[in-house]
């Protein structure tokens, strides 16, 4: 890294400032294409000499470019390909390459797998071999790697959609079961409420019937008490008839009354 004096005379004067390039993973493109995709980004490191605890290392923003214009100009003027933004799978992320092969491709300014796969014959003509393998073979392998990655990404997307559909169907089934259980519980509660109401109504009817019977019994007893003197008179009359019949029978036996006679006639006489 190249260090320049700070552009500021005051507090920034003693700072060591470096713009450099780094890469961050592009999560959306990585998932979409099924392989590691990185975006080139500009970074800045600001450090006070002798202080290893106070280091600012972050993405370069416009305020940094304005604050340190000479450092930014020096960084931007570099012609190295690594300072030029590139998007794709970094060559060192290609699993089929050894570190030596990746370094050789980077030395030839092939920084991504996409760059190797898209290279024309004219670009590859003067390269020859890469770590003992034909560069044309490596290009075919790069194409196959990208195609396989794309297919894997599509399969992963299809699997994700199937999983989402399955989860949605299971959620719907769960909701249907819960709704059915709630409806059954509601019906059961309504039935129990109806049964309780019918039981209460029956008990009220039974109580009313018992009250009516008790009232009728009380009324009959009262009426019997009112009719009691008449019944006594009739009983006395029957007793008098018995006495008269007995007296008549005695007179007949004694010869006081001749001929057949009826007790009724005697009583009547």
Image (spheres, rainbow, N blue to C red):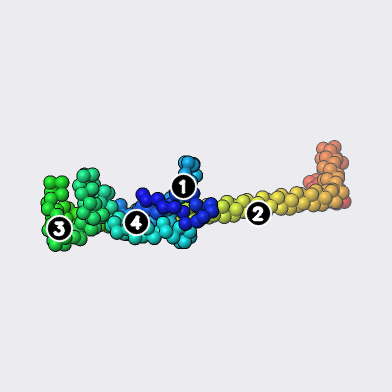
Q: What residue is at 23 percent from the left and 58 percent from the top?
A: 115
Left or right of residue 35: residue 170: right
| N-terminal label among 4 and 2 | 4
**For discs 1 and 3, the disc positioned in front in the rendered view:** 1
| Residue annotated with mark 2 | 201
| Residue annotated with mark 1 | 47
Task: Report x, y in % for residue 33.
Answer: 29, 57
Rounded to the nearest angstrom, the CA distance separating label 4 from label 2 is 84 Å
The reply to whether discs 4 and 2 touch (Cβ–Cβ < 8 Å) is no
SS of the residue at dot 1? strand
SS of the residue at dot 2? helix
Task: Report x, y in % for residue 220.
Answer: 78, 51
| N-terminal label among 4 and 3 | 4
**For discs 4 and 2, the disc positioned in front in the rendered view:** 4
Rounded to the nearest angstrom, the CA distance separating label 1 from label 3 is 43 Å
Q: Decide if residue 137 is in sight here.
A: no
Rounded to the nearest angstrom, the CA distance separating label 1 from label 2 is 91 Å
The reply to whether discs 4 and 1 touch (Cβ–Cβ < 8 Å) is no
Mark 2 neighbour class, 10 Å CA radius: few under 14, some 14 to 19, many 20 or more:
few
| N-terminal label among 1 and 3 | 1
Number of marks in the image?
4
Task: Report x, y in % for residue 131.
Answer: 15, 46
Rounded to the nearest angstrom, the CA distance separating label 4 from label 1 is 23 Å
Mark number, residue 124: 3
Rounded to the nearest angstrom, the CA distance separating label 2 from label 3 is 100 Å
Q: What residue is at 79 percent from the left and 49 percent from the top?
A: 218
Closer to the camera in the image, 112 or 261: 112
- Residue 83, by quadrant, is bottom left
| Residue annotated with mark 4 | 40
């Amino acid at each position: 890294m190249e260090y320049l004096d700070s552009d500021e005379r005051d507090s920034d004067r003693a700072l060591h400032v470096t713009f450099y390039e780094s890469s961050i993973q592009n999560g959306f493109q990585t998932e979409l294409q099924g392989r590691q995709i990185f975006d080139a980004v500009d970074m800045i490191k600001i450090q006070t000499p002798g202080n290893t605890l106070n280091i600012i290392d972050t993405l370069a923003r416009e305020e940094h470019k304005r604050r340190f214009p000479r450092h930014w100009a020096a960084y931007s003027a570099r012609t190295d390909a690594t300072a030029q933004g590139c998007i794709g799978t970094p060559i060192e992320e290609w699993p089929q390459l050894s570190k030596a092969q990746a370094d050789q491709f980077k030395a030839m300014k092939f920084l991504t797998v996409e760059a190797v796969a898209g290279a024309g014959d004219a670009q590859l003509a003067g390269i020859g071999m890469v770590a003992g393998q034909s560069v044309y073979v490596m290009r075919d392998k790069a194409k196959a790697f990208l195609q396989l990655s794309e297919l894997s990404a599509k399969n992963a997307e299809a699997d994700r959609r199937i999983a989402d559909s399955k989860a949605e169907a299971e959620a719907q089934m769960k909701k249907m079961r819960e709704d059915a259980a709630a409806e059954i519980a509601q019906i059961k509660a309504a039935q129990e409420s109806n049964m309780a109401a019918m039981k209460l109504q029956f008990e009220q009817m039974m109580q009313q019937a018992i009250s009516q019977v008790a009232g009728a019994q009380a009324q009959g007893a009262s009426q019997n008490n009112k009719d009691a003197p008449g019944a006594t008179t009739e009983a006395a009359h029957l007793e008098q008839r018995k006495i008269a019949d007995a007296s008549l029978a005695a007179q007949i036996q004694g010869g006081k009354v001749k001929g057949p006679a009826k007790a009724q006639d005697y009583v009547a006489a």
